[in-house]
């Protein structure tokens, strides 16, 4: 379900659309494949837009406010300025969906900063995975398909994790 309204530029097609949703609640089993299984769907042409979702929820989990910008370029779509804040945790990032010339691919770059990683882990339902004063993680992933056709075995990328004064539990929690 959603609540909010878009503001479309009057007569100025160069200005980005401004879309503010007071709330967007996604069911816990949100998903589905809008391509009907096709991994080579090219990105659509979209107008530039700035999006703010003030109250984002996934199932019963409140994720806070999400903001990002979408821009269209000759190679595909770019999503920039992604920012999501949760209790104890902030995520920033950007991504691209490429493929207007036939070869479709997707890529994301992200950074997580947990000033209170214990609180963040508890909030996300993992109460015993970390014990630390602060933690951060950064990464980038690329895969040869549309964004929704992510398959871990086909992805390549990098991951970096830093934990200050603590440790991360590996195994069952």
Image (cartoon, rainbow, N blue to C red):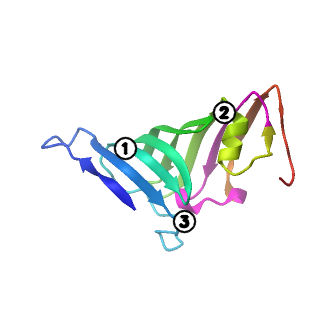
- Residue range in magenta is 131-153
Question: In this rendering, does residue 75 appear at all?
Answer: no
Which callout, 1 or 2, points at the residue further toward the start of the chain? 1
Q: Is residue 148 magenta?
A: yes
Of badges 2 and 3, nearer the viewer stands: 2
The Cα atoms of the two marked residues, 3 and 1, are separated by 26 Å
Q: Residue furthest left?
A: 11
Question: In which quadrant is the N terminus drawn?
Answer: bottom left
Residue plotted at (26% across, 49% down): 6
Q: Which residue corresponds to mark 3?
A: 39
Q: Which residue corresponds to mark 1?
A: 51
Q: Secondary structure at mark 3?
A: loop
Q: Secondary structure at mark 1?
A: strand
Which callout, 3 or 1, points at the residue further toward the start of the chain? 3
Question: In this rendering, does residue 1 appear at all?
Answer: yes
Asked if the residue at tag 1 contacts the one at tag 3, i.e. Cβ–Cβ closer than 8 Å, the answer is: no
Q: Which residue corresponds to mark 2?
A: 114
Asked if the residue at tag 2 contacts the one at tag 1, i.e. Cβ–Cβ closer than 8 Å, the answer is: no
Which of these two is toward me, 8 or 154? Answer: 8
Res 124 label = none
Task: Examine the rendered structure and indicate whether residue 115 appears above or below residue 108.
Answer: above
């Amino acid at each position: 379900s959603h609540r909010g309204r878009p503001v479309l530029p009057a007569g100025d097609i160069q200005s980005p659309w401004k879309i503010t949703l007071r709330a967007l609640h996604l069911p816990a089993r949100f998903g589905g494949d809008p391509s009907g299984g096709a991994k080579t769907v090219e990105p659509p042409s979209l107008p530039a837009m700035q999006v703010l979702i003030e109250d984002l929820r996934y199932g019963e989990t409140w994720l806070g406010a999400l903001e990002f910008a979408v821009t269209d370029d000759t190679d595909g779509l770019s999503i920039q300025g992604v920012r999501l804040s949760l209790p104890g945790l902030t995520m920033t990032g950007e991504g691209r969906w490429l493929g207007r010339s036939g070869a479709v691919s997707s890529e994301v770059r992200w950074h997580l900063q947990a000033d209170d990683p214990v609180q963040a882990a508890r909030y996300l339902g993992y109460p015993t995975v970390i014990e630390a004063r602060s933690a951060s993680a950064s990464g980038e992933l690329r895969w040869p398909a549309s964004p929704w056709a992510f398959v871990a075995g086909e992805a390549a990328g990098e991951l970096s994790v830093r934990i200050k004064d603590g440790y991360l539990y590996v195994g069952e929690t």
